[in-house]
Structures are given as C-alpha cells and as structure tokens.
C-alpha cells in the first residue's frame, strides 16, 4: 500500500493522461468537428478574425475559471441543484469578461453583441463542467478547460481567416489583397460573409477532420 501511495505522489503533473486532456480536444476529440458542439458561435462571429480571436479568448477564460471553481466545490454542490450552481458561476464569469471587453476593446464588444452573453449557455462549457469538473480535481479540470477552449478557438479562427480573406480581402481588419488585383477585375466573394458560407466552411473542416481521425474510422 505504501509503495502504491508513493507512486501516486510522484506522478508528474503533465503525465500522459494529463497531456491527453490538452491534446485530444485539438484533434481526436475536438468539441466542434468531432462532438459538433458550439456550432452557433462558429457561424455567427467568424466574419472577422479579430472577433473570433476575442470570442475564443473569452471562452478560454470562462472555461478555466468555471472548471476550477466547480472542481473545488464538487463535494459541496448538491446534486439536485448542480446545473443551477454551474449556470450562476458561468454567468458571473461572463459578466466580468463582458465588462472587461467593454472597457478595453469596446468596438469588438459591440460587434460581438449578445454572443458574449450566450457563452453562459455554451454547450461546450456546460458539458465540461458536468462531465469533467464535477468528478475531477482542480489541476486536471484546468487542463481540460484549456484543451477544449483551444480546440474550440482554433476552429473559430480558421473559419474566420477564410471568411474574412475571401469575403473582404482583409485579415484582422488589414487589407492584404493588393489594390492592383481589384484593378484587374478581382472581386471579393460576398457569399463568404453570409451565414450559409460559414456553415459550409465549418462543414468542410468537419469532413477533413473526421476523415483524418483514425479513431472514428476504426470505430465505424
């Protein structure tokens, strides 16, 4: 018994299991492309890279602190009111994030509009609280939050890059397609800034991601 306990104490913080919490959501268990969660925000705020980045960063902050708080309180939260407690924690964090955005990046906050508030009911956040933070210690819960938020965020940014580049010829609001291209007859693809093209872009990424996911291919 003492040897087993000693092994557990010496287990490294970034063990293979903990590393998987960070890496799996980036590819094999991505919340958008594999679990098909958080699609609404991926369609709504990916017209510009700046908006997508701020949204991804906001979700990261909310996920880290909500996972941490719920994990710390996991033995104190009554089972019958756990969803309400989780919503209160996430809502409080979202309000703080929204106020910070309004104070420091007001223009982006105004463009994101109600979508920051909708982080409260983001199925990825609520899913990780319910499925992971309630049953695990704080450190793994933080790693799980970082991994899933990063997996969510990189998809948002990739979609936004395609939409902003082909839709307006810009990246991060900066013109990247030279004016000479337009002088020769080049036109921005106006469809890229419309919601249907966001859905198509996300669909293509999901198709590529799933086709390269050996775990899903083997299970089928």
Image: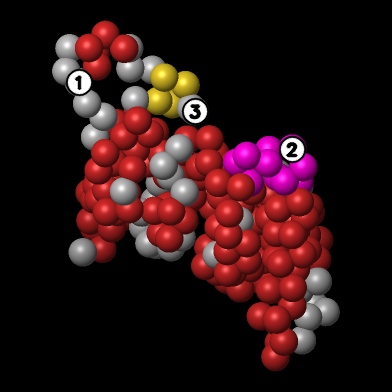
Q: Is residue 196 left or right of residue 115?
A: left
Q: In this orientation, which residue lies closer to the viewer: 2 or 112?
A: 112
Q: Which mark is residue 104?
A: 2
Q: In this orientation, which residue lies closer to the viewer: 162 or 180?
A: 180
| Residue in the image at 61% along x and 47% along y | 110
Per the model, the C-alpha gap separating discs 3 and 1 is: 20 Å
Per the model, the C-alpha gap separating discs 3 and 2 is: 17 Å
**Crowd class of label 1 (few under 14; some 14 to 19; many from 20; radius 10 Å):** few
**Crowd class of label 2 (few under 14; some 14 to 19; many from 20; radius 10 Å):** few
The residue wearing badge 3 is 172
| Residue in the image at 43% along x and 60% along y | 40
| Residue in the image at 53% along x and 35% along y | 50
Depicted 206 relative to depicted 170: above or below: below
Mark 1 or mark 2, whichever is nearer to me: 1
The residue wearing badge 1 is 186
**Crowd class of label 3 (few under 14; some 14 to 19; many from 20; radius 10 Å):** some
Per the model, the C-alpha gap separating discs 1 and 2 is: 36 Å
List x then y, in percent, for residue 93: 74, 59
Q: Which mark is residue 32?
A: none
Mark 3 or mark 1, whichever is nearer to me: 1
Q: Is residue 41 left or right of residue 68?
A: left
Q: Which residue lies furthest to the bottom in this view?
A: 80
Indicate which disc, 3 or 1, sits on the residue closer to the N terminus: 3
Q: Considering the numbered disc 2 on the image, is that residue within a helix, a strand or a loop?
A: helix
CB within 8 Å, label 3 to label 2:
no
| Residue in the image at 81% along x and 71% along y | 73
Q: Which colour scheme is used?
A: secondary structure
CB within 8 Å, label 1 to label 2:
no
Q: Does the magenta stretch include residue 24?
A: no
Q: In this orientation, which residue lies closer to the viewer: 126 or 88?
A: 88
Q: Give the range drawn in magenta.
A: 100-109
Q: In which quarter of the image is the C terminus?
A: bottom left
């Amino acid at each position: 018994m003492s040897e087993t306990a000693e092994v557990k104490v010496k287990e490294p913080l970034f063990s293979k299991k903990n590393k998987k919490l960070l890496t799996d959501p980036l590819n094999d268990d991505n919340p958008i492309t594999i679990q098909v969660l958080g699609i609404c925000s991926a369609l709504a705020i990916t017209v510009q890279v700046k908006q997508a980045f701020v949204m991804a960063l906001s979700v990261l902050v909310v996920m880290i602190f909500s996972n941490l708080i719920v994990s710390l309180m996991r033995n104190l939260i009554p089972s019958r009111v756990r969803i309400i407690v989780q919503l209160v924690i996430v809502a409080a964090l979202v309000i703080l994030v929204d106020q910070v955005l309004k104070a420091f990046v007001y223009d982006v906050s105004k463009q994101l509009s109600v979508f920051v508030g909708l982080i409260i009911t983001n199925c990825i956040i609520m899913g990780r609280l319910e499925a992971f933070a309630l049953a695990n210690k704080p450190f793994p819960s933080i790693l799980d939050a970082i991994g899933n938020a990063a997996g969510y965020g990189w998809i948002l940014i990739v979609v936004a890059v395609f939409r902003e580049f082909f839709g307006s010829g810009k990246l991060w609001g900066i013109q990247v397609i030279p004016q000479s291209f337009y002088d020769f007859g080049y036109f921005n693809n106006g469809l890229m800034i419309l919601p249907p093209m966001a859905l198509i872009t996300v669909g293509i990424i999901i198709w590529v991601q799933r086709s390269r996911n050996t775990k899903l291919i083997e299970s089928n």
